[in-house]
Image: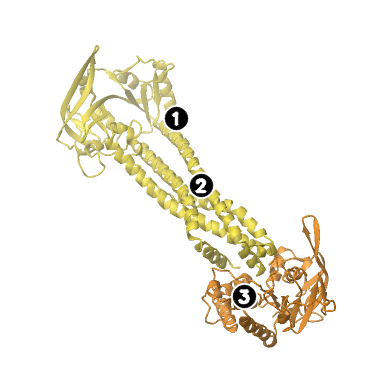
Chain colours: A yellow, B orange
Amino acid sequence: MKSGDLISYSFNAIKTRKWRTVLTVLGVVIGITAIVALLSLGQGFENELDRQFQQGFSTNSLYVSKKTGIINADPTFELYFNDTQTIGGFENVELATPVFRKTIYIEGPSQNFSLNVFGINFTEYKQIFPFIFVEEKGSISFGTPTSGFVIGSRIHKPFRNDSIYLDVGENLTIYWLERNGTEIIYNNLTAQVDAVLTESGSFASGVNDIGIYIPIEMAMDLFQTQQVQSIIALTTDDESATLDQVTTQIEEFYADQVTVSAPQAILAQIQSSFNTIETFLASIAGISLVVAGIGIMNIMIVSLLERTREIGILKSLGTKDHTILFIFLIETGIIGLLGSVVGIGLGYGFGFAFSFLGNFRQVSIQNPAAGSIFTGVSPVLSFSIVLQAILFGVLTSLIFGLYPAIRAARLKPVDALRFE
Amino acid sequence: MDDGIIMSKPLILEAREVKRTYMQGKIPVHALRGVNLEIEKGEFIAIVGPSGSGKSTLLHLIGALDVPTEGELIIGGKNLKEQNRNRLAEMRQQVGFVFQYFNLIPRLTALQNVELAIAILGNMKKNQRRQKAQKILEEVGLGDRLFHRPNELSGGQQQRVAIARALAGDPLFLLMDEPTGNIDTKSRDVLLDLIKNLNRNRHITVIIVTHDSYIAQQADRIVYLVDGVLYDKDPTHSSGRVFESNTNQPKEVNQ
């Protein structure tokens, strides 16, 4: 039999069992949908991560922060503003700039938001983040002292659409807690928005879309402190030897009470833990495909029993064993292919739905930062994902369809013809 | 008809001491005990025998659906014993099998059923194939039933589709298993006329296996199968047994 005839014969057989085929295909659809949703979101996440890191960080920067953890980390150790000068004076360090961070509250559209206010040196910060510490609206006042706010793009437009919550020139009140000895003081400050930053994404410690930026001097004055949360050091070059040397130097100077990390290392770490999660989730999705495979096997065995006589007829007409095998495999292959194609479409759709929900959640929870993992992440359906999904779907179907197909091919013509 | 198979004699089938033994559990059942038979090209032969005589076994062997336990069975110049599964399938392509229960594929139309037999040979383009199938169906008088499925046809019509399907592959011979066993008397006569016609005018070799002596009498030659052995004359006649001519006899268990 010619291959075209085989395919149309198999199609004809499938067509007469519409509902059964639809249900069997559904099994494959579910498995492939889960896998494609995961992989396409994963790919989107990775792409976004890469983009933000490449745009947001200089490869020759190092982040110094106080060490955290239970063992060997002194909880009372703090970094101070003047440590910036110390680190700036180290060998191979070009520039060191302080980052002060405090959690404050603002009044949101329906409830209060908790977010971070950053005290920074605008000019130095711009040197480290030349592409993302950029105003989209208004102007950042470099050099001249200011008492206004520079806000992240998500505070300006929290809903990722055109509706503006807070614009340049409007007033914003921030609320925070202060301790005076054992006493709690509720404080607030109202100031004008000077500028809105361009959108940068929300990973790691780069420029934050939901952050408020003020000059470091204003922050120290406002919050009555000399403490800073991190110091960013720019090294003379991005050779790993230089980065290692500066890292060691800083760690030794602070008797191992600070953590020095490079953005590249952070990126690798995020990617690696993300890959682990992705693999784990994909395995779970894979299990559903195995279940679908068992369903296919089941249905093909039933089909084999129902069609034993038909196989006998085909054999009496001179059909060879391998042709019978092909007829059965083509049927399972068609089921796998249909399931994969539908699953790819659905999975991609689910990816979008999920990323939409992620963005939606962002504005409705109290701490916007917590829900931001999928901010700006859209599923990416690469050719390789499509190929993998189809291969996986079709192969699973074929593997599980093999046993019934072999049984069908090996039937003795006389026995098959006698079968009632 | 395949003219390339002519040997010293124009035999299309030659059986020498063919035996077929089954194991029923641990007990051997000798279905054929040494069958000798020669069939010439163009013959119309009936193999007659009662239930349990080994008819079905012989039928399966002639149709290359099964192989003998012992002896030589040469069909179209090829010894069955020397063929592997693939070659046996190829030999079946040269047999025009017509079954008692028609054995059409229910979801295919009359035309598709006939086309399928040609498609299995894999040697013809789709529209040629369709034309040929249509021509044969017209020849058996079903030109107006091309797109009917088996369940939309009468028994006689289904059997004619089956004959058309058997003819479609240009077989060495038509091998018919109780071809009139499941159709009414009127259709039976139409069918017998068709078979005789095919034999006389198209010189198609016809082998009918039956227990019905009325059918058998239409043939040019009758051989008798009794207890797994073939006879030229009815061996049971002297002992008073006669073959039934009633088509409503109990059907064979294994068909």
Decide if residue A120 is in sight here. Answer: no
Q: Chain of mark 2?
A: A
Disc 1 versus disc 3: nearer the observer: 3
Q: Residue at x 34, y 30 (%)?
A: A205
For the residues marked 2 and 3, what is the alpha-carbon distance in whole angstroms? 43 Å
Q: Please name the residue that numbered disc 3 is placed on.
A: B162
B12 in relation to A31, above or below? below
Measured Cα–Cα span from mark 2 to mark 1: 44 Å
- Labelled disc at residue A240: 1
10 Å crowding of disc 3: few (<14), some (14-19), many (20+): many
> Label 2 sits on what residue type?
Leu
The part of the image, by quadrant, that contains residue A203 is top left
Q: CA distance from mark 1 to mark 3?
A: 82 Å
Q: Residue at x 54, y 70 (%)?
A: B108
Residue A346 or B244: which is nearer the viewer? B244
The local secondary structure at tag 2 comes to: helix
Q: Are marks 2 and 1 in contact (CB under 8 Å)?
A: no
Instruction: Identify which amino acid the numbered label 3 is placed on.
Output: Ala
Q: Which residue is mark 2?
A: A289
In the depicted structure, whether residue A24 falls above or below residue B168:
above
Q: Is the same chain shared between marks 2 and 1?
A: yes
Q: Residues within 10 Å of mark 1 (few under 14, many from 20)?
A: few
Q: Chain of mark 1?
A: A
Note whether residue A124 is visible.
yes
Residue B182, x across and y down, in percent: 63, 74
Q: Earlier in the sequence, mark 2 or mark 1?
A: 1
Q: Nearer the viewer, mark 2 or mark 1?
A: 2
How many dots with numbers? 3
Rendered position, A152 above or below A11: above
